[in-house]
Amino acid sequence: MRVSFVSGVVGRLALLALVAATPVPALAQDPAPAPAAPAKGYNDPGALPLRTPNAEEPVWARPAVDTLATIRTRGTLRVGVVANEPFVMRDASGELAGFSIDLGRQLAADMGVEVEFVPTSWSQVIPDLIDRHFDVAATGLWITPSRALVVNFTDATSVGAMHLLASKSLAGTKTSVADFNAPDVRLGVMAGTSQEGIAARTFPKATLIKVQADGDPLAPVLEGKAHGVIVTTPSPQLVVRQAPDRLVQPLEQPLQVTRSAMAVRKGDADFLNFLNSWLTFHHEGGWLDERERHWLGTDWLTGM
């Protein structure tokens, strides 16, 4: 019995050893993984490779000044103006008058403050505004891309145009653009302004006499040095009226329409929004349109 038991145990051990030593076919129990399912959605064949993060340091805006609160605390609205008929001028009694003066006075009244008009010049109006010498520029300022880079404009307050005016003695018989687009024609323009660009495109054959910022654009014509001059005005008749014996308007149509607006410093969205809301209110109420007809038409000329 004992011998049989030992023999049985030895036999079973030998069998287990034989099984353990028998090689097993590789991966017989581990089949290869299935291929990954294709990604869902549109596969853009023109997709660009992923970009690396932009390391350029942005320019952060300065903390904003609350101009509305500043004006109301001060109790006075400061308006920058440049002498510019019929926007800013003096009446028969020497008092300030004009379209922009009316705007400034009504704006201050609606804000419940006093108004102070701060005189400046065309070359200084933008720097003076940025340097906080006044709160808003309201002086028939044209909307141009170069100015919009450094200040914010409100919605347009008026519409003007660039006109060609001519010397009655030198160009009294010229009546078309072609007549003035000739090598022997001299035209006065303000240097570095939109008028210079319009003159160069419209009259490429003419010679441009460039008047500097503090000069009188009419001077070349009135002094007999130019056949014509490009001026921006809501009323060319107003300019001719200054020297009717020496100036004429040879073209009925303007060379280009221009728009004017008030200007404020950048970074104060609340003040800009208030001014635009104010303009909308007075446009819809009719007051602003009535003031524009009065000052930018010609009816007021007999009363000045």
Image (cartoon, helix red, strand yellow):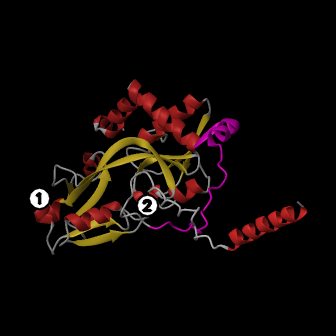
Quadrant location of the N terminus in the rendered image: bottom right
Q: Residue furthest front?
A: 1
**Residue located 45% across and 34% down the image:** 279
Q: Does residue 139 appear anywhere in the picture?
A: yes
Secondary structure, mark 2, is: helix
- Closer mark to the observer between disc 1 and disc 2: 2
Q: Which residue is mark 1?
A: 176
Tag count: 2
- Neighbour class for label 1 at 10 Å: few (<14), some, many (≥20)? few
In the image, residue 303 above or below residue 20: above
Residue 120: x and y, percent?
Answer: 52, 54
Q: Is residue 72 left or right of residue 215?
A: right
The three-letter amino acid code for the residue at tag 1 is Ser
> What main secondary structure does the magenta stretch of the protein show?
loop
Residue 203: x and y, percent?
Answer: 19, 67
Q: Residue furthest top?
A: 285
**Residue located 81% across and 68% down the image:** 10
Q: Is residue 56 located in the magenta-colored stretch of the structure? A: yes
Secondary structure, mark 1, is: loop
Residue 50: x and y, percent?
Answer: 50, 66
Q: Is residue 71 located in the magenta-colored stretch of the structure? A: yes
In the image, residue 263 above or below residue 7: above
Q: Which residue is mark 2?
A: 146
Q: Residues in magenta?
A: 49-78
| Quadrant hosting residue 73 | top right
Near-viewer residue (121 or 246): 121
The three-letter amino acid code for the residue at tag 2 is Ser
Q: Is residue 250 left or right of residue 46?
A: left
Quadrant location of the C terminus in the rendered image: top left
- Neighbour class for label 2 at 10 Å: few (<14), some, many (≥20)? few
